[in-house]
Image (cartoon, rainbow, N blue to C red):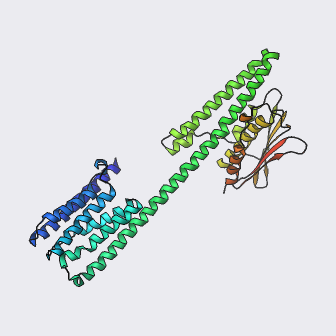
Amino acid sequence: MRSTSAQGCVRGFALGASLAASLVDLAYADSTGSGMGPVAVVLAAGLAALLWPAGRRPPWFTVPLRTSVPAALSLLYGAGAVLAHRTEPFGPCEPVVLLCLLFLAVRHARPGWALVCGTLDGVALLALPARFFGRALGDALALLVVGLALIGLVAGVAAYLRSVDHRRTAAVGETRRAERLAIAADLHDFVAHHVTGILVQTQMARMMGASRPAGLDPVLEGIEGAATQALTSMRRTVGVLRAPEETEAAQRRPVGDLAGLVGLVDGFGGPAQKATLLRDPSVTDDLPHEVQAAAFRVVQEALTNVRRHAADAERITVALRHRGDRLEVSVADDGRGGTQLPEDARGGGFGLVGLNERVTALDGELHAGPRVGCGWETRALLPVRTP
């Protein structure tokens, strides 16, 4: 409300000052006996281009049209005066209007139109002395120098603000792109983890349906829980896209921390698998949020890959400990690569790529490879203090 009132006050002041200055121009033209008609037409076109409210401006009233027509009318008026050998005065309003139109053209018109319209406005401003002095332009040399200086100053300021607008737009676009990539990473990290668990437990239920139907209830309960968690994660991620405020989006965004690792590890596995969390007592919950979130994603991605690529693993160990000034997060399994998942459900390797980007962004290191003997290990070293 305050911003709207301030804009209304500024617009009202600009309108009043413009009308007062235009009255000075008209009175000056009338006092010399040259008539107020041509001056009134030029000023009306220029003030309409500058003061017409944006919300009521018709679509055809574009920036090139608004900045070129008043300058063209001023040039025609001046050319007619020179050809007719008449002395036509100009007041303070017309030069100010032409300078404002020059600013508008350079800052807001498209590059090609900015050059054309800006040049037209500048030429119209420099041609004003010819209307008054006629062919004796030597007497108008000082005015021409002042006009060139004003044109350079106004065009320079407008070009600088245009570059600032361009950099801001590029920064906003890059921020949106980074946010979309982060949301895609969240979709992979959270939803893919739960959906892979649903797929594994569904296969287990099919095998138990024929041999041990009485033991299906725990498996079906696990499928139900994983599906609920997947829907919750999806709802939160979609909520990020719909949240109108950044603070609200930050609150609704899926998060992970060291405390959440207990539930993540306890909810993993099946009858033949056992996941264990080994957390050194020196690893506290007061680490930076970025470090905790990265550690959570490392464990989550590693457990998802165990389901996808090492369904025969029986022991999975998740370990957290300090190594110097870094936090070491490791997930090791004893699988031999046996899996019954369909080829389309094994992933395309983008999980580790995104995880590596997340870890290296914190100045950390990520290693994933086979263990001595059998099994696989994913290990990340994260700085305790983020850069």
Q: Quadrant of residue 71?
A: bottom left
Q: Nearer the viewer, residue 267 or 57?
A: 57
Q: Residue at x 76, y 18 (%)?
A: 216
Q: Quadrant of residue 103?
A: bottom left
Give the x, y percent position of residue 2.
34, 49
Q: Nearer the viewer, residue 82 or 219?
A: 82
- Residue 13, can we see it? no
Q: Residue at x 32, y 76 (%)?
A: 148
Q: Residue furthest bottom?
A: 138
Q: Residue furthest top?
A: 214
Q: Residue at x 24, y 69 (%)?
A: 75
Give the x, y percent position of residue 32.
10, 73
Give the x, y percent position of residue 333.
83, 39
Q: Quadrant of residue 39?
A: bottom left
Q: Is residue 202 above or below residue 370?
A: above
Q: Is residue 312 above or below residue 161?
A: above
Q: How many marks?
A: 0
Horizontal side of residue 242 vs 380, given as left or right: left
Horizontal side of residue 360 vs 8, given as left or right: right
Q: Residue furthest right?
A: 373
| Location of the C terminus (image quadrant) | bottom right
- Residue 368, can we see it? yes
Give the x, y percent position of residue 55.
31, 48
Q: Is residue 177 above or below residue 212?
A: below
